[in-house]
Image (spheres, coloured by chain):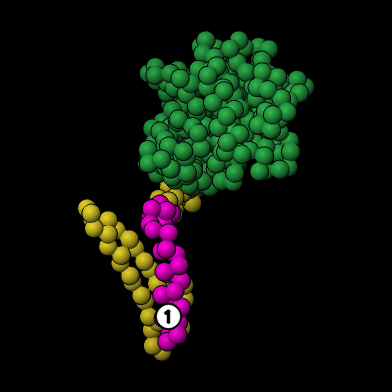
Chain colours: A green, B yellow
Amino acid sequence: MARIVVITSGKGGVGKTTTSAAIATGLALQGRKTAVVDFDVGLRNLDLIMGCERRVVYDFVNVINGDANLRQALIKDKRTDNLFILPASQTRDKEALTTEGVERVLGELAKEFEFVICDSPAGIERGALMASYFADEAIVVTNPEVSSVRDSDRMLGILASKTKKAEEGGGAIPATLLLTRYSPARVDKGEMLSIEDVQDILSIDLLGVIPESQAVLNASNSGVPVVLDEDSDAGQAYLDAVARFLGEERPYRFTTLEKKGFFGRLFGG
Amino acid sequence: MGIFDYFRSPKTRSASQAKERLQIIVARERAHRSGPDYLPALHREILAVIRKYVHVDDEAVQMNLEREGDCEVLELNITLPEKD
């Protein structure tokens, strides 16, 4: 049975789509057959981050409406085997994502894939609720910043009450924290919430810490998921997170300031 | 951290402020979420009743729901304005 995983956050611009692309690609690199689904109806963007924007013919809503079947709409990734993308529709009709339609499409995907990664839109409107409704587990993407942490807590509340499992009395779906845009230098100066601070507030398990990195913008500029930039700090941090997701234990990297020499410590940085 | 950091204004250590503010607001929002749906309406109506007799601001009525085992305790704290 497939694992349906929602990548969510509440707040926009924290790295949900970057994370969805990176985790889905990372799982496929491990030989796991993975589909990544864009739930951001109206503002399609996953296709750009995955670099397949010119190959979109049919989309999620076309499949829900029966205008196309899943096989026609799924885009096979050109770089990574075992990886398929289901793009969002650009329709303005937010009601296009019907509960029955989403359930049917996710059910079909679950038959064929080992992992289904749902890239949630920002906010707590229909698209975001639908992205998490049928999920088995959640990855909450958070920046070490007040509004992002607060919105993540709000989203944890929704995951505890507004999913199918919760409505059937099964309680909250398991959720883990992925801290992105982390800057150890700023944490060291007392200017940024630390990993421990964010965990104290949200009290969920940590899946990974992605450092603030130029590699992320470079990756989106060129439409190549950042995990394929294997030499980059962010790429390696995402690969660590994928390994942990699959049950492996990995030490955390890029989370502490590199040790400075005596003069460096004396004069600060 | 270098020695010059100790001369910097404490304002630059903003992370601890962020954590403190978040702990307060998150605790408040969680309490609100876990409470029964009628709490906000109850709060509004109690406030309206009090305002028939004295003028108070929105903060004057504080409601707090606590669980102790199987028992739920609704604590109501009404602050009346000082006489001048």
Which residue does the numbered mark 1 point to in the structure image? B49
Q: Position of residue A199 (x, y in %)?
A: 40, 38
Q: Quadrant of residue A77?
A: top right
A213 vs B52, left or right, is right
Camera-side residue: A188 or A14?
A: A14
Camera-side residue: A153 or B9?
A: A153
Which residue corresponds to the image point at 53% horizontal and 39% vertical from the top-left?
A: A9
Q: Is residue B44 magenta?
A: yes
A217 vs A145, left or right, is right
Q: Which residues are magenta?
A: B28-54
Q: Position of residue A226 (x, y in %)?
A: 61, 21
Q: Position of residue B17 (x, y in %)?
A: 44, 51
Q: Is residue A83 above or below residue B52?
A: above
Q: Quadrant of residue A265?
A: top left
Q: Position of residue B52 (x, y in %)?
A: 45, 85
Asked if one can make out residue A32 in the rendered structure from this viewpoint, the answer is yes
Which residue corresponds to the image point at 68% horizontal and 22% vertical from the top-left?
A: A69
Secondary structure that dominates the magenta span: helix
Residue at the bottom extreme of this rendering: B84
Camera-side residue: A79 or A131?
A: A131
The amino acid type, in three-letter code, at marker 1 is Val
| Other-residue count near label 1 (Cα within 10 Å), few / some / many at <14 / 14–19 / ≥20 | few
Q: Quadrant of the N terminus of chain A?
A: top left
